[in-house]
Amino acid sequence: MLRNGPDAFGWATILLHWAIALLIAGLLVLGYVMTRPDIDPVLQFDLFQWHKSFGFTALGLCIIRVLWWLANRHPAAVAGLSVRERRASFIVHILLLCLTLSVPVTGWALASTSTLDIPSFYFNLVVIPPLPLAKSAVAEALWTTAHAVLAYGLAGLVLLHAAAALHHHFIRRDAVLVRMLHNRWRDG
């Protein structure tokens, strides 16, 4: 089933979830590698452009994910979760949605305010226009800090999210993780 059901996620939700998860993991690794001080400048330029391209891809998928989340029903909580666990899950998911949007937007703002004035090439196909923000060293420093802090916050939240899913799968042996790995084919 494409859409979410009353107790299972649909294929669209599952594919968006894992595509965004892979992009986030890759962007975090790429962000670390490209900012190393001993990297070749030509390679560094290419890595920055790849990082921006995948970041714009993540932003696009995250916008689709949020719209899909708003337009779809949400499967019922797995049986056995306490009210506190359901609230914590809801809060973590809202924070994940917010951070997966805000991290790429702050990266875009960083590129837009950079005094280097280097265009953002989307996979060498098109140039993504900068946001209408003033270019200055102060603005660039602000957006650099915001992007880094939010990215590290997202990384921490992703680790918490993954640890909780693994805890539910291996310790509590419930369907929290399994229902994000596949859905059951059924009518409706």
Image (spheres, grey):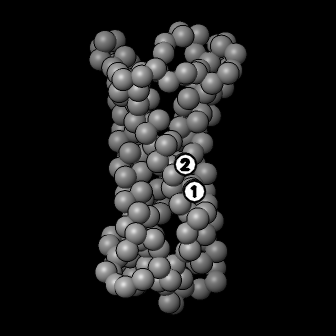
* Residue 23 left/right relative to 65: left
Which element is circle 2 on? helix
Outermost residue toward the top? 116
Which residue in the structure is indicated by mark 2?
Answer: 63
Where residue 99 appears, x then y in whole percent? Answer: 58, 48
Residue position marked by numbered label 1 in the rendering:
67
Circles 2 and 1: CB distance less than 8 Å? yes
Q: Amino acid at mark 1?
A: Leu
> For the residue marked with disc 2, what is the amino acid?
Ile
Left or right: 84, with 127 as reference point: right
- The residue drawn where x is 33% and y is 81% is 184
Element at label 1? helix
Q: Residues within 10 Å of mark 2 (few under 14, many from 20)?
A: some
The image quadrant that residue 150 belongs to is top right
* Quarter that holds the N terminus: bottom left
Percent from the top left, x then y, of residue 36?
37, 24
The residue drawn where x is 47% and y is 73% is 4
